[in-house]
Amino acid sequence: MNEKYKVAILKWEEGHVPVGLMQLETLLGNSTNSKSYPFPVKFVSVKGANTDTVIIHPSQELLKEMIRISKRLIKEDGIQAISTSCGFNAIFQKGIAEALDVPVFTSALLQVPFVHNMIGKDKRIGIVTANKSALTKEHFHACGITDNIPLTVIGLENAAEWSKIFENPDQGFDINTVTDEVINVVKAGVAENPDIAAIVLECTDLPPFAEKIREETQLPVFDFSSMMGHVAIALGEMKLF
């Protein structure tokens, strides 16, 4: 049994990751960059996991494969918590969590009820996502987000450089341009919805931009990193004192 790792992150299948996402993986804070964590994290590629099976057409066969791999990781490697590398895996949250005996945190969206209770029932949460049209109530409900929680979904799919992830997955993009697009889209979303009191970044590629978003909006920002920190403290991988 490997005692080194407590947390495992299930990744997309090697060779099926858009070039732009591989570029974003190099940024500190990205969910699949090992340097993003002050403790060891085990990364495991899942055959069949890609843009289509996770985001566009969530696959029940993929769900079964993730459960199978997770059970092996728990039994053979002593893994104590399972996560995933894409927030759209939220749709599989209940299925995986109910099948395993360790904590499962598939998406930063799990923090939304927590944030809602912190800011009050009349204030709005801005959800920033890679693709607004693909993020459904089914994703929200799987994470315990009820219909009475005020949300504004801010999508990046119309940003020209960012959209290459979906429209031209074999084409790279300019990181500086993507950075500007992310910040400008979020700022516009907040300006259009002045009752937004907090932001949750659904996409696991967005934590590298969280600090800049905080500076520009003056709002608290929750993301994959804040969720990972919460779990890491619970498992004793991180300490505040």
Image: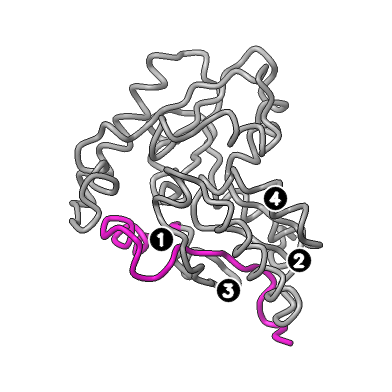
- Mark positioned earlier in the residue sequence (2 or 4): 4
Q: Pinpoint residue 190: horizontal percent, then vertical percent.
A: 42, 21
Q: Nearer the viewer, residue 214 or 64?
A: 64
Categorize mark 2 by other alpha carbons within 10 Å: few (<14), some (14-19), many (20+): few
Above or below, 198 relative to 239: above
Q: Please report contact status of discs 1 and 4: CB closer than 8 Å, yes or no.
A: no
Kind of residue sitting beneath label 1: Leu
Count of numbered circles in the view: 4
Above or below, 37 relative to 231: below
Main SS, magenta region, reads loop
- Mark positioned earlier in the residue sequence (3 or 4): 3
Residue 128 painted magenta: no
Residue drawn at x 20%, y 44% as measured from the top left: 177
Q: Please report contact status of discs 2 and 1: CB closer than 8 Å, yes or no.
A: no
Label 1: which residue?
28
Residue 236 is labelled as: 2
Q: Secondary structure at mark 3?
A: strand
- Mark positioned earlier in the residue sequence (3 or 1): 1
Write the start and end of the magenta stretch as one range. 1-30
| Quadrant position of the N terminus in the picture | bottom right
Query: In the rendered view, does 15 fall on the left or right side of 168?
Result: right
Q: Nearer the viewer, mark 3 or mark 2?
A: 3
Label 3: which residue?
42
Categorize mark 1 by other alpha carbons within 10 Å: few (<14), some (14-19), many (20+): some
Calculate the distance from the C-alpha at mark 2 to the C-alpha at mark 4: 26 Å
| Quadrant position of the C terminus in the picture | bottom right
